[in-house]
Amino acid sequence: MQSLTDSALSTLELDTDLQRAPARQERSLLILAGLFVLINHLALTLVREDSAGALWPVGVWMLCAGIGHIALNLRLPRRDPLLFPLVMFLTGWGTNVVIRLVPSYTLRQTAWVVVGTAALLVIIALPRDLRWLRRYRYTWLITGVSLLLITILIGQNPAQRGPRLWLWPGFGRLYYQPSELLKILLVAFLASYFSDHQRFMRDDSIQIGPWRAPSPAFLAPVLLMWGVCMVVLVWQRDLGAATLFFAVFMLMLYLASGQTLLWIGGLGLLLVSSAAAYSLFDVVALRVDIWWNPWPTSGGDSYQVVQSLMSISAGGIFGQGIGQGYPAIVPLAHSDFAFAALAEEWGLLGVIVVTMALAALVVRGMRIAARARQTFRALLAAGLSLMLGVQSLLIMGGVLKLVPLTGVTLPYVSYGGSSLLTGFVIAGLLLVLSGEDQAEL
């Protein structure tokens, strides 16, 4: 009897240690991230009078990090200890970039950090089995598409020019872009649909030469819903989101089916749709022409791209130093070209750090997917991680002139409340997926 009691106590102590380990790791990483953000901000206030001011944005960031850490300890003691520190590290760095480039946006960006943290807390407080997300997949997706349709009628643009892709909730100067919400809803829809129809993918596939492909009966509903999303996005001229959705859709379809033919079909569809978009949309033709050869119009249409390349070149390996460069010369350096601004003042070393942090987020997310025992949870984790990864590659590749510009933001770093809020929701879902026992629920 005594031996059984001792064994039970030992098991309890081991279980307690396992629960405390992620909390200790996360706390240490958050402290390091906090020191980086604080020193970065102090250095900025010393060298740039236009960015000087109180330390309250850093204080708000630290408060959000602390509250988030405590809530995660209570709700998800066995979560992945790297996810939240990585998100807060990138968010803090991005907030300092915004303060550096557009000091008047300090309050707005800091407010979105608070809203994003609150959204993450709401996500981890909801039922952890995520049935609320899986069961009502059509409802969620139709809601997202409906919001997109509403923007066609009453959408606004905070800059008062360009596509009207934002909705105004009715207070302050906070706008929200529904296509950001649709990122999560589309991934959740695909994960739910694919997991519920696994048998049809396996048993009802059709043979095409040496390859097998999903049956039309399986693909029809998902292609219909995905097609509606794409049509609305193209109608809105939100081509960045359309490109991102297409890439993530093809990747998730391949993960769910494992059929190589889909890559061939997806590549063919991409080439055809790209050629059609180039012929039908002036904005697409302009961006492709700029990507192909920006120098003839370096003082006009391609001014932004050329200046970003020069900004990156000026950064060199070690950068110009915090607050020492001229990244504001690049139009929209705080949003679409935050990567170029960061490269100029932090150099190649800063670029490597940001790239590694984003890559670590994606890798940890895919690790969560690989360990999941439930197909829905695996596909959801993989889809959300791929969404962050593909978005990062698109904007970094566009700024470096490796691919045409798409207009998406650099996750957690660029200015933009909609993107930041979506990033925190994605982080919350990944934390839930990492902290829950992955057994069939």
Image (tube, rainbow, N blue to C red):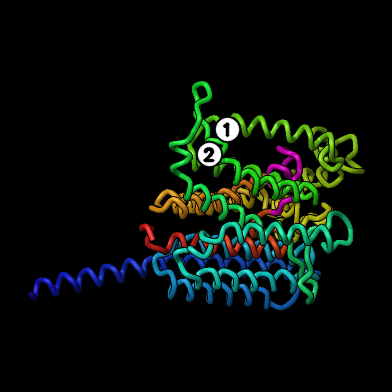
Residue 236: tell me if it is visible: yes
Q: Say whether residue 245 is left or right of residue 192.
A: right
Viewer-nearest residue: 345 or 91: 91
**Residue found farthest to the left:** 1
Tell me if mark 2 has few (under 14), some (14-19) or many (20+) residues whose alpha carbon lies within 10 angstroms of its own. some
| Quadrant the C terminus occupies | bottom left
Residue type pointed to by label 1: Trp
- Residue 399 numbered tag: none
Residue at 31 percent of width and 69 percent of height? 17
Q: Is residue 398 magenta?
A: yes
Indicate left or right for 152 with 206 as reference: right
Which x, y percent locates residue 58? 64, 73
Q: Secondary structure at mark 1?
A: helix
Residue at point 41%, 53% (across, down): 374
Q: Vertical placement of 390 versus 64: above or below?
A: above
Does residue 49 appear in this view? no
- Judged from the image, the secondary structure of the residue bearing numbered disc 2 is helix
Residue type marked 2: Tyr
Mostly what secondary structure, the magenta segment? loop
Q: CA distance from mark 2 to mark 1?
A: 7 Å
Q: Which residues are magenta?
A: 396-409
Q: Write down the residue under mark 2.
A: 254
In front here: 11 or 241? 241
For label 1, the residue is 263
> Residue at position x 67%, y 74% from top?
57
Q: Quadrant of residue 121?
A: bottom right
Magenta stretch containing residue 387, yes or no? no
Q: Residues within 10 Å of mark 1 (few under 14, many from 20)?
A: some
Residue toward you, 353 or 20? 20
Residue 13's place in the image compared with 418, above or below, is: below
